[in-house]
Amino acid sequence: MAAVGEEEALDFVVSLHRLVRLLRRGRPEPRVQPTPLIVLALLNQYGPCRVGVLAERAACTQPTITAAVGRLEAGGLVRREPDPADGRATRVVMTAPGRRELVRMARGEAEALAGRLATLPPEDARKVLEAGRVLRRLTDCD
């Protein structure tokens, strides 16, 4: 594999940040801020999790995730339940309203991305989508 230069890596990181900003503009009025939204996305991907596991997967501190879970719980988007593997621990579970909110937010971002992809030649659009699959593997913790 060819080595990636510092300038190339920096350009890639800047491009990713710009893409995230573009996608956020496509969101409907946010009811959920970024960290709680990440928690919902992780619960959707992995199912019920302990707060510590969510913190690890989100690359955040446990207090940050605990606060996000508290906000989500207050809004009825998640609930805590005893962990069947260890009755002393609790895990966070996404509720049906939480799933609907995640879908609502993701739909706006997906529409924004689709609009941008439509401006590219089809082969470039396919490359972007393939890069997304590679990025998912890169960012998966498991």
Image: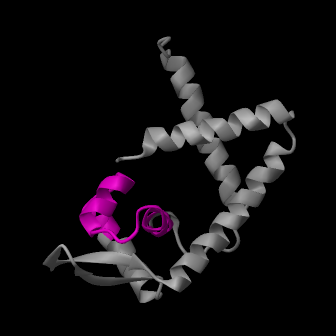
As drawn, is 51 to the left or to the right of 89?
A: right
Q: Quadrant of residue 99?
A: bottom right
Q: Nearer the viewer, residue 104 or 30?
A: 104
| Residue 93 located left or right of residue 21 | left
Count the marks: how many?
A: 0
Q: Give the magenta part as a residue range.
A: 36-65
Against 19, residue 10 (above or below) is: above
The structure residue drawn at horizontal position 64% and vertical position 64%, both measured from the top left corner, is: 106
Above or below: residue 56 compared with residue 73: above
Residue 109 drawn above or below residue 127: below
Q: Quadrant of residue 66?
A: bottom left
Residue 125: x, y in percent?
77, 37
Is residue 73 rendered magenta in the image? no
| Residue 31 can be seen, yes or no | no
Report the predominant secondary structure element of the magenta stretch: helix
Could you say which is closer to the camera, residue 48 or residue 56?
Answer: 48
